[in-house]
Image (cartoon, rainbow, N blue to C red):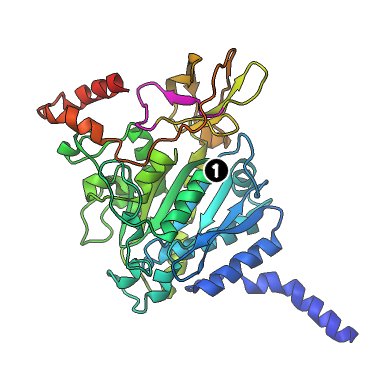
Amino acid sequence: GDRAGSLCLALALLFPVAVGLEFSYHPSEELGTFLKEVHRQHPSITSLHSVGRSVAGRDLWILVLGRFPTQHTIGIPEFKYIANMHGDETVGRELLLHLIDFLVTNDKSDPVVTRLIDSTRIHIMPSMNPDGFEATTVHDCYYSEGRFNKNGKDLNRNFPDVFNSNNVTIQPETQAVINWIKNETFVLSANLHGGALVASYTFDNGNPATGSLRGYSRSPDDDVFMHLAKTYSSNHASMYKGNECGNKPVFPYGITNGYAWYQLQGGMQDYNYIWGQCFEITLELSCCKYPPASQLQAFWNDNKAALIEYIKQVHLGIKGQVLDRHGQPIPNVIVEAKGREHICPYRTNQHGEYYLLLLPGSYVLNATAPGSGSILKTLIVPNGPENFSALKYDFVFPEVSTIARDASCPTKPLYQDFESISAAVKPTLHFLALMTVLYTVFK
């Protein structure tokens, strides 16, 4: 009767506090339950959906946080974290659950969290490989079969590659992430791994056109990538020291170019950068791939500040729209900064928006609309993250003749065309400078 009712009410009031998220490993079912509960308690700032299913049919859950969580808002950049693509690398999976918990409980009370949620749409995928996680029975520091998906495939070798033909069967988990990237305008991302303590950045693969003969595969945005990696490592409790795992190479500042560490083909971060117009780094967060649950609280304490500071970097650089004289957005317009053109040019989305991550400085932006020529604009870029907003600049084209409909680049090894050019060039000190010139000419 009434007493039972008032007892239920008392319990309900206690419930959110009592539940809390424990520092333990959460199997797939518990993970799904936690995400649904977060969405139930915070419906105005979260949205929950599955972007696909694993081989065994488990949902690939994504929790989205923001003031307008259900859809893209013009001027609000999209950010994502992905963890556990290797099923036996488990720390990232739990860190992302705690990050979600931290963000929803501190919104409207912590000023940084509040401004992040105001200014950013944050997508979190705690597990890209739930089957591998469930298959990992032995919890230890080293490699296990749980790394792979249920078909025995390494998901971080399973994406299209920009340097070599990657003759692999694309797995359902990979395809789900590819579709997700296509459907959103992601600007910045990180994927969370384990087995070392370092922030690793693009490119993971390479050829002479990107400097592979020197053992470092450099993207046109190398300065931004180094800054992104350093932002994470320097805000982490110890990653910046660069030698915490003992048995691994020493990483100055706790960062490394992916290729300089070891070459890999079909990786997710290079795919994001080339075909997703999204800068992604790979965060190796624990010397031990699957440490004891008793260490999870310490891992959270070590990573919390870095996870937050990294999201802020989505506000680096310049953003805006390309419009016609009637103020209508123009999609598929190439907008790039001079001297850092991408091999697959970065184009405006369906809302005519562009986002370019750039460090503070002076840049010449070039907007090129099909059949309508180019507009050049010199802009001084401030430090966007401290204001939670990139510099805003809109281009207006007075006349637009044709709109390029599907302007996406084919998922083939776009850098292979450079090999024939570079094969004739002897590696000298001027090699990279020459390649940059050739790169610009052959654009």
Q: Which residues are magenta?
A: 331-344
Residue name at image x 22 percent, y 45 percent: 260
- Counting from the top left corner in percent of width and height, residue 431 is at 16, 26
Residue name at image x 61 percent, y 52 percent: 65
Quarter of the image with the N terminus is bottom right
Q: Is residue 131 above or below residue 384?
A: below
Tell whether position 340 is magenta.
yes
The kind of residue tagged 1 is Glu
Q: Is residue 209 above or below residue 16?
A: above
Which residue in the protein does label 1 denote?
A: 78
- Counting from the top left corner in percent of width and height, residue 161 is at 31, 45
Question: In the shown orientation, is residue 407 left or right of residue 105?
Answer: left
Question: In the shown orientation, is residue 421 left or right of residue 42?
Answer: left
Residue 93 visible at all: yes
- Counting from the top left corner in percent of width and height, residue 347 is at 48, 30
- Counting from the top left corner in percent of width and height, residue 25 is at 47, 73
Regarding mark 1 in the picture, which secondary structure is present there?
strand
